[in-house]
Amino acid sequence: MPIHNWRRVHAGAYHDFHTSWMSELKKQLNKGLLPEGFYALSEQTAGETGPDVLTLHVDSPQDESSDVPAGGTAVAVAPPRVSYRVSLSEDDIYTRRRRTLTIRHVSGDRVVAYIEILSPGNKSRRAALDRILDKAVAVLNHGCHLLLVDPFPPGAFDPEGIHGAIWSQFSCSTWQQPADKPLTLAAYTGGLLPQAYVEPIALGAVLPDMPLFLDEDWYVNVPLEATYMEAYTTVPRRWRQVIEGDAGQRS
């Protein structure tokens, strides 16, 4: 099933789908996709433009060894299959904008990664986009990892897409969003020198699996297409007709 043009529907209809998609992702992660010791919780940030967040926790500090736990994939053995891998240079360390924020779950378990699916409101105003950027920078600076899905094209406040906006907070280098692939999937590793695994996609494209890093050196692949399809079955027929109409796939 190709990714749809969600600008065709009002915010409430998209939010309903967004909630279903997050629920399907959580279900798949907790049904065995995550290695032993990891679990997914669905949390919501208060505020009009705050995105829903799928938060991963580990119940004890991670082992410093480089062994890959059961269910994980080593980057050295099977690098994530994306079109671009973007790394920071040593010089970029000195130009990074630093934030101070410790992100923990209320239970005291250590947060290791986030999944974010953006909504139109996250990019509708400069202040709303700044919230996303501040959060992404804080997460990565804290050593956590991030998988971000943006099913909306660049706007006035992110002319090079959400990855371009995030990467500009870390690097002097520029990112140019492919004109024919305006939507963005991006997986980030946190720490002193974050890395980005970016897959620009076109409206109407099938969603590929994307890596969710649980450590800088290993990840699990998240089934975006399968979970998207399952969530889409819950969309009311009234809105499916709007989305799937002849005009529904136009950008």
Image: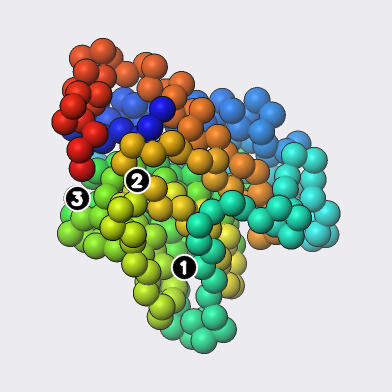
- Residue at 16 percent across and 31 percent down: it is 247
**Left or right of 182: which side holds 36?**
right
The x and y percentages for residue 82 are 54, 54
Residue receiving disc 2: 202
Q: Quadrant of the N terminus?
A: top left
Above or below, 183 against 164 in this view is above
Determine whether the residue tagged by mark 3 lies in a helix, strand or loop. loop
- Say if mark 1 contacts mark 3, CB within 8 Å: no
Whether tag 2 and tag 3 are in contact, CB under 8 A, the answer is no
Q: Earlier in the sequence, mark 1 or mark 3?
A: 1
Tell me, for residue 100, which label it has, or none: 1
Marks 1/3: CA distance?
26 Å
Q: Residues within 10 Å of mark 2 (few under 14, many from 20)?
A: many
Task: Give amino acid for label 3.
Answer: Ser
Q: Along the polypeptide, which appears first: circle 2 or circle 3?
A: 3
Q: Which residue is mark 3?
A: 124
